[in-house]
Amino acid sequence: MISAILGGLCNIVLLIPNITVLNVLTARFGTGFFLAGIYPVGMKIASDYYKDGLGKALGYLVGALVLGTALPHLLKELSWNSDYKVVIQSTSILACIGGILIFLFVPNGPYRKPVSRLQLGVVTQLFGIISFRKAALGYFGHMWELYAFWGFVPILLKTYVEQHRIGIPISFWSFFIIGIGFFSCILGGYISLKTGSRKVARYSLIISGIFCLFSPLLFQLQMEVFLALLCVWGMVVISDSPQFSTLVAAAAPAELRGTGLTIVNCIGFAITIISIQLLSYLTDKIDPTYLFLFLAIGPILGLYNSRKQ
């Protein structure tokens, strides 16, 4: 709750009149800092409610993350004058409401095991567990692709529009391509109950990696096929996330689940900075249709490092 409210306040600081560049950067840092107190902690809360079926539960949780990620694009599309202030105001208010809802309606789970003391050596301990390390490395490969794909969906659509000289609502389709991952997360959660989380995670990573490798060919397709395949990519690019998180949680000792999830999440999000900055740098250096080839690095390394010995 505290992280959600403070994150929302840091976000709305952007609307202060005549704000300086330093204050903008500080506000964005604060928003990102407090987001780290929401997502991994949310997964820890979910894990405290489930001994079995955690893959399904995290499927719903990550599905909610997907909708939240896509929502600003929809807000921009629905805003009659595309005013960026509407997006910032809306997301800030929703963040605060979400924090209050957690506080009022979601108590600690029945399987919560609190840690009595701070254990600074736990990172080495956790990565010493083979199953934990493999799940984490698979997750890192997934994260290399995920947020760079989400961040550059509008660029992908704009490139297609300019090449074919057609008009499509880019903000709406950005919302739809990202948001459709909500359904694949939930579907993957149910499938994991029968096949296990590892299969769902690896097959999702394989298919999304194939999309990366063949992404230049997408721009040659008819608009309907192009958009349909982007929706499929939007589904498989995220459906492995809750399952890798489930594998991480299952591999960690019960009292260290929250710590393990947080560590892996933090490293994963740090990796996204590199891939996003790489694509940003390459945008003006190469043909945009080849940008997404570089995202295949993540799935390839993730699949290799999470394989069975």
Image (tube, grey):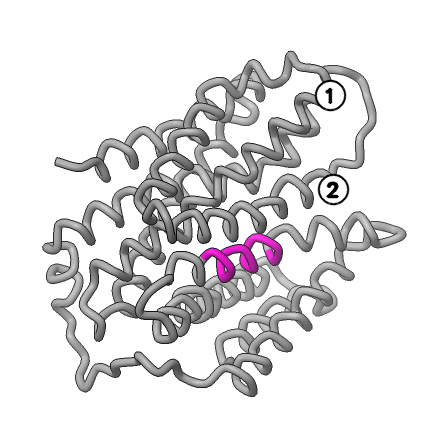
Q: Earlier in the sequence, mark 2 or mark 1?
A: 2
Q: Mark 2 points at which residue?
A: 171
For this orientation, the residue located farthest to the front is 194
- Residue type at the position of mark 2: Ser
**Closer to the camera, 28 or 194?**
194
Q: Which mark is residue 223?
A: 1
Q: In this view, does 63 lie to the left or right of 175?
A: left
- Residue type at the position of mark 1: Met
Residue 111 drawn at (x, y percent): 31, 79
Residue 133 drawn at (x, y percent): 19, 49
Residue 293 vs 71, above or below: the answer is above
Q: In this view, does 162 lie to the left or right of 254?
A: right
Q: In the image, which residues are magenta?
A: 59-68
Residue 47 vs 305, above or below: the answer is below
Principal SS element in the magenta part? helix
Image quarter in which the C terminus is found: top left
